[in-house]
Image (spheres, rainbow, N blue to C red):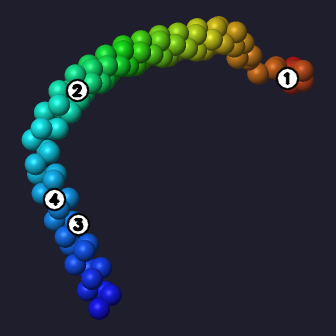
Amino acid sequence: MGFMDNGFKGLLSGVAFGIGAAIVAPIVLPILSAGVKPMAKAMIKEGILIYEKGKEVVEETRETVEDLIAEARAEAEGVQSFAEELEPEPMPAPKSKRSSPSPSK
């Protein structure tokens, strides 16, 4: 019968806790929410500010990367045109040193 006694005591304590919570909740919840609401609002506001700052940083980084890409392309085009200017003219094929047969007289 030990199990029945422990089970019944546990049930009674659970019911008592539920009734106590139902009585105390309407008094405690408004007090807690009054303190929690400003804190939640401040956290949301900070989150918005952090998000906006993050957007600015991402935008500045994007602009910097685009500038670097443009500069690299310009330099690459400059190097390519410089290399094209340095390419030697194709040399004509060397003439043979053999003299052509002289016409017979």
Q: Nearer the viewer, mark 1 or mark 4?
A: 4
Residue designated by label 4: 18
Residue 86 percent across, percent down from the top left: 70, 9
Q: Nearer the viewer, mark 3 or mark 1?
A: 3
Can you say which quadrant of the picture contains the C terminus?
top right
Task: Report if the CB atoms under discs 1 and 2 are less than 8 Å apart.
Answer: no
* Residue at 31% from the left image edge and 16% from the top image edge: 49
Under tag 4, what secondary structure?
helix
Res 69 seen here: yes
Residue designated by label 2: 35
Residue designated by label 3: 13
Residue type beneath disc 2 = Gly
* Quarter assignment of residue 47: top left
Up/down of 22 relative to 35, above or below:
below
* Residue at 16% from the left image edge and 65% from the top image edge: 15
Up/down of 24 relative to 83, above or below:
below
Task: Report if the CB atoms under discs 2 and 3 are less than 8 Å apart.
Answer: no
Q: Earlier in the sequence, mark 2 or mark 3?
A: 3
Task: Report if the CB atoms under discs 3 and 1 are less than 8 Å apart.
Answer: no
Residue designated by label 1: 96
Q: Earlier in the sequence, mark 1 or mark 2?
A: 2
* Quarter assignment of residue 17: bottom left
Q: Nearer the viewer, mark 1 or mark 2?
A: 2
